[in-house]
Amino acid sequence: MPLVSMRQLLDEAAKGGYGVGAFNVNDMEQIQAIMAAAKDTNSPVIIQASRGARSFAQDRFLFHLILAANELYPEIPIAMHQDHGNSFETCKSAIDLGYTSVMMDGSLKEDGKTPASFEENVAVTKRVVDFAHERGVTVEGEIGVLGGVEDGHGAGGTGLEHVTDPDQAVEFAEKTGVDALAIAIGTSHGAYKFTKKPDGSVLKMDVLIAIHKRLPNTHLVMHGSSSVPKDLQDVINKYGGKLKETWGVPVEEIQLGIRNGVRKVNVDTDNRLAMTGAIRKVLWETPEKFDPRDYMKPAREAMQKVVAQRMTQFGQAGHAGDYKAVSIIEIAKGYKDGSLKTKPLVAAK
Ligand SMILES: [Zn+2]
């Protein structure tokens, strides 16, 4: 099957009532880990690349690795997504290359750091939506501003400075026509999300639920949603690492989100922790080793284990065979004739 439109993949997830993990990649081993997990759990999957990843892998290496995944696993629906596009040009370059989905993060200015105004966000996102939908490509937008910094992208802070306003989310969805919407509910990028186990005072699940009620057809996206499990932190620290104590988003909170319209869950940090821990262990226990395969193989296995676990927890496991990919040319027709138009249940005030 060809690479799948993320819109189709998320529409199917909505029908099935499950969430889909979107896992970040930079290299071959990470893609192999995701695909092995997808095959083992029979899961559709979103593979995403940040601007930093595209630059690290010289863009084409990464894209062709995804095509290899697609060739080797024709039975698995794969959407290829640009994570945190900072401008129209970044999104266009991903679409021109063959990505089936892009995120236009207009919540920040092009520098990827400074919060943008609502009007600026609407304007740049709408421009990307017009260009992308004409080509059958999915668009994720962001309203509100997430906390933390990852890959040099982010406004910093705790994530509670710019929590999404539900009215604004509805207005944004109406004005831009995005397929998916990342919202800020107190989560942050990176490993250091929370200094204690998060509760209702830091994770605004009530905001998420309020937005979903009004935008039932716009797929919600949780960013900064690694769980940062203690056992993965412990492996790193046991073998010479120096991570400070930290908490991520508990899986139960993500599952509550999935019951309330979250269809895409971004996970990066957990996989980074798993790989780094596995590499540290090999180098620490057998310092005489120098073949990269000696530590990349366990690293790949460690990431595969985390990804498979998330696929099961998010509910996407078992759903790879539910549908066949619709070509993005067909999807483009759906945008044109209005059948894929998303409408708020109650219009913005
Ligand atoms: Zn993000």
Image (cartoon, rainbow, N blue to C red):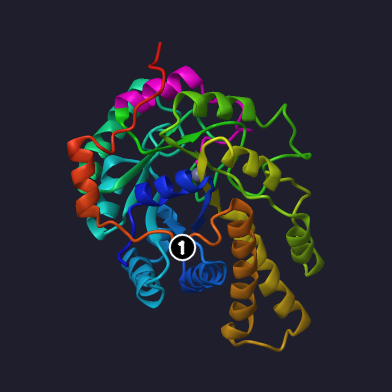
Residue 210 falls in image quadrant:
top right
Return the residue at label 1: 320
Amino acid on which the number 1 mark rests in the picture:
Ala
- Magenta stretch in the rendered image: 154-175
Q: Residue at x 75, y 33 (%)?
A: 199
23 sits left or right of 281 in the view = left
Residue 4, placed above or below residue 153 = below
Magenta stretch: includes residue 168: yes
Q: Position of residue 282 (x, y in %)?
A: 71, 79
Residue 224 falls in image quadrant:
top right
Residue 249, placed above or below residue 237 = above
Q: Position of residue 169 (x, y in %)?
A: 44, 24
Q: Is mark 1 within 8 Å of ligand 1?
A: no
Q: Residue at x 73, y 61 (%)?
A: 232
Q: Residue at x 65, y 61 (%)?
A: 309
257 sits left or right of 144 in the view = right
Q: Residue at x 78, y 70 (%)?
A: 239
Residue 292, placed above or below residue 206 = below
Q: Residues within 10 Å of mark 1 (few under 14, many from 20)?
A: many
Is residue 203 shown to the viewer in this render?
A: yes
User: How many marks are shown on the rendered structure?
Assistant: 1
Is residue 120 shown to the viewer in this render?
A: no
Question: Label 1's element?
Answer: loop
Q: Position of residue 102 (x, y in %)?
A: 35, 47
- The residue closer to the viewer here, 13 or 71, is 13
Q: Quadrant of the N terminus?
A: bottom left
- Outermost residue toward the top in this view: 349
Q: Quadrant of the C terminus?
A: top left
Q: Position of residue 83 (x, y in %)?
A: 42, 49
Magenta stretch: includes residue 243: no
137 sits left or right of 229 in the view = left
